[in-house]
Image (tube, grey):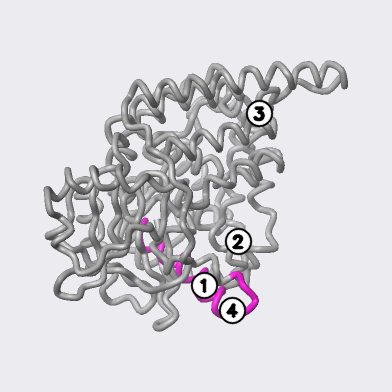
Amino acid sequence: MGDGNGNGKSRRQSRVPSGRLERLARIGLLAGEIAAGGVVESVRRIAGNASEVGLLLNEENARRLAKRLSGMRGAAMKLGQMLSMEGEDLLPPEVAEALSVLRADGDAMPASQLRRVLGRAWGKGWQKRFREFDWEPIAAASIGQVHRAVTLDGRELALKIQYPGVAQSIASDVDNLAAILRLTRVLPAGTDLGELIAEIKRQLRQEANYTTEAEHLRRYAELLADSPEFVVPAVCEDLTTAHVLAMDRLLGVPLEDLRGSEHPQERRDRAGAALFRLVLRELFGFRFVQTDPNLANYLWLPDSGRIGLVDLGAAREIPQRLATLYAELCRASMYGDRDELAAAATAIGFLPPEATGAQREAMLDFAALGSEPFAEPGVYDFAASNLPSRARDEATKLAFSHGFRTPPPPETLFVQRKLGGTFLLCARLGARFDARAIIEAELPTLSATRPSTCTQGSRT
């Protein structure tokens, strides 16, 4: 969640529902609204003799979903944001457009609710700890909102303040929203998502603990201490709690602003290449990955030209085995080694050992799509690529033509989110760069000392 510079405008305020029963009631109301909307849509389609596929996932219901989730904040809105990030390529255009509002700033909580939150975090008289405190938030997102403050000794801070009730309602929010998504047929009927839902809950519980995020900030600052491309804000230890994260304020603009005509193409290219290089370092070098590649989590700092990493709540450890297998998968797809690709995909869990020959070839074709940006030497134009839509089409064929109905292994869920999200970041920036040169520079240093876990004839 970026802190940015603010625009001087007052944000819309609405009270955050903090009790479990209140949040459950709101989701129940949403389910009723969507069901009623589906009845109306059904009449329309019968009259027009239209297909009933995605009956409840229409534009009006998508607007209802976005409005309710935006008002609830918390895990419910966070999951809606995750869906909206992929919406442009996975959903009908009008539905994707309706959900896109979830990627913008949400409502701010009223000052009275904010005072109670800070009173519980810092105690009575907390205002005396600051020379300045801006009541108007700089940003308001799914789990918390950000305020500017200046300490008595002149240190300018960004205070990330968590909405009340968010941490306690994660499990019920996720379960209830999953039911809503099944109702709208966003999720396939009969699909067993138990393990994935458990992993999502675990991840969101971590994101809701700001003490953990403070640890991540300190760790990333150390890992990237020698980087000329990135900067991580320092934590203010005295003011950080489980529900308030205090860190130095980075003076920058949202990374997405680089799309503007006032920024040269070279600047967009450099930012995209830096993000691509970072994900390789995270996955294969650090084995510690920030798994929420939302544009709002990055700032561009005009004074230095560096990128600020301002939201590290979703960072997670990557086991050595999984990192090694992803390296094998990457090398195999890049060099067109189908046998090694099959071995790596099977070991990770993407390709079931009992898959038929046709299923095997279809999965390998799908896996090979991911190497397109670096399959050939030279500059790859991310903005001009239709790779996400082609990947969507192939995923649909895997599920409905080739019978792949089992969800991917839970341990890969957020790694895939980071990899796919980084591609989308580069595309939205309009970046063009030689991805092959970057990955070839990284891969030998990542696994040259380790033998392949897949085939003896592995390329290095």
Residue range in magenta is 259-283
Task: Give the spatial CA distance, label 2 vs label 3.
Answer: 26 Å
Mark sitting earlier along the chain (4/2): 4
Task: Give the spatial CA distance, label 2 vs label 1.
Answer: 18 Å
Q: Amino acid at mark 1?
A: Ala
Q: Which residue is mark 4?
A: 263
Residue 153 or residue 216, whichever sits in front:
153
**Residue 187 location (% of width, % of height):** 56, 27
The numbered dot on residue 437 is 1
The residue sitting at the right extreme is 48
Q: Which residue is mark 3?
A: 57
Mark sitting earlier along the chain (3/4): 3
- Disc 4 vs disc 2: Cβ atoms closer than 8 Å? no
Mark sitting earlier along the chain (1/4): 4
> Would residue 158 be counted in the magenta stretch?
no
Q: Amino acid at mark 3?
A: Leu
**Residue 413 location (% of width, % of height):** 43, 40
Inspect this view and state whether residue 456 appears. no
Task: Give the spatial CA distance, label 4 vs label 2.
Answer: 16 Å
Query: Quick one: SS at disc 4?
Result: loop
Task: Give the spatial CA distance, label 3 vs label 4.
Answer: 38 Å
Q: Which quarter of the figure is the C terminus placed in?
A: bottom left
Q: Nearer the viewer, mark 1 or mark 4?
A: 4
Q: Nearer the viewer, mark 2 or mark 1?
A: 2
Q: Quadrant of residue 60?
A: top right
Residue 49 or residue 432, whichever sits in front:
49
Q: Amino acid at mark 4?
A: His
Residue 68 or residue 208, whichever sits in front:
68
Q: Residue at x 53, y 45 (%)?
A: 102
**Residue 110 location (% of width, % of height):** 36, 45
> Would residue 279 be counted in the magenta stretch?
yes
Q: Which residue is mark 2?
A: 427
